[in-house]
Image: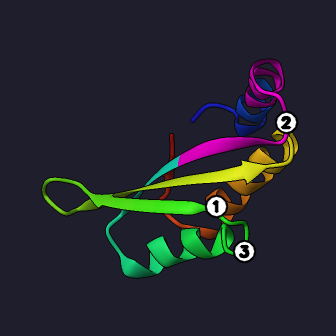
Amino acid sequence: MKDPEEFYKKLKEQLADTSLWPASYLYKFIVPTNTEKIEQIESIFDNLGSVIQTKQSKNGKYTSVSINVRMKNPDQVITKYKEVAEKVEGVISL
């Protein structure tokens, strides 16, 4: 796996260059289809006024979770990515 800190550093630079903050940001995650894992992701974005959509893969083995939420700045975006990676086992961030 690539160095996560390097990934976050690049992401922060891209976010700072491409958006005026605060801005809406679309997170996309893939998790093994499991109600508990999906609820863990949803709870991380609770009380932020986020719009959450889930969609199962064709065979039902995985679920994609898309979250559109207004974030204050690139640091807040990255903090949420890290929180999901820490708390949800088997998650893939896109």
The amino acid beneath tag 2 is Trp
Compared with 9, 28 (above or below) is: below
CA gap between label 1 and label 3 equals 16 Å
Mark 2–mark 1 distance (CA, rounded to whole Å)? 22 Å
Quadrant of the rendered image containing residue 42: bottom right
Give how far across and how far down residue 47 sits, in percent.
72, 74
- Mark closer to the chain start, 3 or 2: 2
Report the residue that reaches farthest toward the top: 17
Q: Above or below — where is 75 with respect to 86?
A: above
Element type at mark 1: helix
Residue denoted by label 1: 84
Query: Magenta stretch: residue 77 in it?
Result: no
How many numbered marks does the figure carry? 3
Which amino acid type is marked by label 1?
A: Val
Label 3, label 2: how far apart the Cα atoms are: 19 Å
The residue to which callout 2 is attached is 21
Disc 2, SS: loop
Q: Position of residue 52 (x, y in %)?
A: 50, 62
> Quick check: 82 left or right of 13?
left
In this rendering, position of residue 45 left or right of residue 40 = right
Q: Quadrant of residue 87?
A: bottom right
Q: Name the residue beneath numbered marker 3.
A: 47
Residue lying at the far bottom of the rendered structure:
36
- Report if the CB atoms under discs 1 and 3 are less than 8 Å apart: no
> Tag 3: residue type?
Asn
The answer to which of marks 2 and 1 sits earlier in the sequence is: 2
Residue 12 position by quadrant: top right
